[in-house]
Amino acid sequence: MSRYLILAGVLAAAPAHADAPTQGIGAELGIASGSHLTPGGLRVAGHYTYQLSGTDWFDGSASVTFGGGTARCFLDRDGSYVCDHGLLDGKGGELVAAVRRMFDAQGEFRPYARVGVGLGVARFSDDDVTGLVLALHGGGGVRATVSDGLAIVIDAELVAGLGAFGHSIGVAPQLGLAIMAGVEFALE
Amino acid sequence: MRLEALLLALAACGSSTPAAPPPPTTGTLVVHVTSGGKPIPARIAIADASGAPVHRGTLDLYNQRQGAGACVILPGVLLTWSGLVLAFGDGTIPVNATPCALAPGRYTLTAWHGIEYETATATVDLPRAAPVTFELARAITPTGTLAADLHVHGLPSNDSTMPDAQRVSAQLASGLQVIGFSNHNFDADLNGAIAALHLQAQIVSIPSSELTSDWLHAGTYPVPVVPGAPNGGGPDPATLVGAEAPAMFAIAHAMSTHPIVQVNHPRFRYGALFDISGWDGVAWPPPFPLEFDAVETIGGFTAANTPEDRRIDDSVRDLYTMTDHGKLVAAMGNSDAHDFTWIFDGTARTYVYVPAPRTQPFDQIAFVAAIRAHHTEATTCPFLDVTPRPGDHVAARAGKVDLHVALAQAGFCHATRIKITVGNKLVLAISVTGKTADYRATIDVGTADTWIGVTADGDDALPLTQTGTYQRDEWKKPGVTPYAVISPILVDADGDGRWKRGDADLVLK
């Protein structure tokens, strides 16, 4: 118990990076690519960050993905329902809990890495296919401070996981790539 | 007398022993058809305790056949003159004494899903039967193909009354994936009915028309459909009815969609180009123009070989004669189904080898191109897996070609021989004794460009409950006989990259 108290004390006492606030919020816009049963398209995400240690921040996000496409599921000769959607097809929403590790600044830019886990929904309406998705996220980006309390971020991440879908599909893999850009504001 | 009856009734009421309740006269029959545990569309033939087929609905078509007279239990659940049609693999059928129900009694049910699966049978005692599940085992796996029936009729035809949704259900239940909705002089497809039943993942319709004259019937697909327009936007029937082959082919080729032109039932005697023109199937050139891409080598109305009438053999002879003279066409099999009685959907069908065998999205361009390139096999039940593929070309090495022929058939299909023909000469006949056969050989092909034909056939008719009763009703024949024929394989024997035979001099790509 005492170890946890010490850890909590250390975390609380850890100084914030001069260019990264203890708490912040952000918004990003970008492109996500999917295929098969992973939705892709225009992605909008909102972030909440909270400093956990000298280098690590909790990064919670909520995102929605708006893709296009038409019906692309069919019954194959074995009676299996196969979906073959394109890179930018489908719709999705996801909540992600991640940890963002900030690295030493390179001039005006501070690179970071992020890993997390997400829970979401994937939907391909023209095929009436919906799934519940559990996915691992991993990626990285760069944060550049523009002014006091305002920063620009650009990042990319890979998503891999599994989805449980209806329509007799069952469990299917999820694999996607997203490239996003946005702004972050300090809350304090 | 009335007083006595009253006294008896009163005595009965006072009896201390209650009368046994009468047996129930109503209920339901719940059926599921699956393959690998997944629901599969199917037809179920129903026989009563004496083994006689059970008929339901009415014979509305010429008082002889059932077009629109089936009982619609639910969309996709039909109780017909020839049994159940289940578009979704499930059905709940009422049991009572009304015309659109099964009466109490003992029945034998036989479920089937076209020619790619074995049948399954169960006996039920109604009305108190537990739900019945039929698990169908796959017998044929035609990898890389779409199963097509590119000549079927429905409501727009003057000789059919089949509603669109019922046609879709029947096609699906028989294992078809692509429907050519080819009504007489009427451009149409069934994609609206398919969408209404939410079946796009399983089946698709290519817009089609059967150009019909006194001289010939020519299937055309795809055609430009204009919903609501007279004849679906197709040519005026008045211009077609007297059209001979040259005019008919010209009309077809003038269409903006550049359709496949398919000579339908050329040996049907009626509306049959080869018969009516007097072609003997051997003489060359034949007495008609050759402006067509495909020939219905196996048509539903002529899908029977008997000792006195080798109608399918005649059609294969026609195909081989054309090939031997350099006129290449795709060998097609179609049901020409009009109803639920005479010829069932898919009784003859075509397997079309396509790059992406799917119905959604359906690559219609690739599908049509595959037919134009003769990558087809026509069959009534056996399946020939031949390498090189049907319609392909192969270069000979030192006058020889490697050939692999594998046959598969369900238990109700009895093909007993495979024939391999090279350059219109039968070079090999192989006996088949079971459901499968596998033959590999190096075939001598000589030094001049030639072709290889492969067929499989047998003499024992398929069950009428799986094909319809036309052959028996009209011609007193036992029924449809097993036959498969591939579009011939071209052999570049001299290795010059061209195929030169008869009138043909083709650059092989």
Image (cartoon, rainbow, N blue to C red):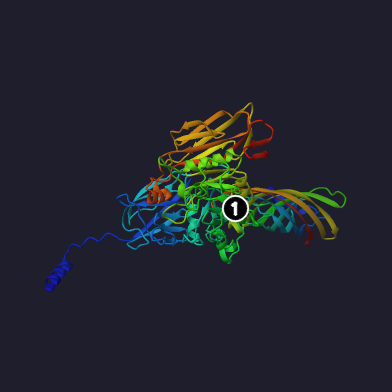
Task: Give the secondary structure at mark 1.
Answer: helix
Q: Residue furthest right?
A: A107
Label tally: 1
Spot occupied by residue B269 in the image (x, y as percentages of width and height) = 47, 50
Spot occupied by residue B441 in the image (x, y as percentages of width and height) = 55, 28
Q: Is residue A6 visible?
A: no
The residue under label 1 is: B246
Q: Quadrant of the C terminus of chain B?
A: top right
Spot occupied by residue A9 in the image (x, y as percentages of width and height) = 74, 52
Query: Which residue is more in the foreground, B451 or B92?
Result: B451
Type of amino acid under label 1: Pro
Q: Residue at x 79, y 53 (%)?
A: A154
Spot occupied by residue B219 in the image (x, y as percentages of width and height) = 56, 53
**In terms of image quadrants, where is residue B284?**
top right
Query: Which residue is more in the foreground, B163 or B238?
Result: B238
Q: Residue furthest bottom?
A: B3
Q: Is residue A28 above or below residue A75?
A: below
Relative to B39, A15 lies left or right: right
Q: Which chain does tag 1 point to?
A: B
Q: Quadrant of the N terminus of chain B?
A: bottom left
Query: Which residue is more in the foreground, B104 or B507?
Result: B507
**In terms of image quadrants, where is residue B254?**
bottom right
Question: For mark 1, does the 10 Å Cα neighbourhood hold few (<14), some (14 to 19), or many (20 or more) residues?
Answer: few
Q: Residue furthest top?
A: B398
Q: Is residue B388 above or below residue B204?
A: above
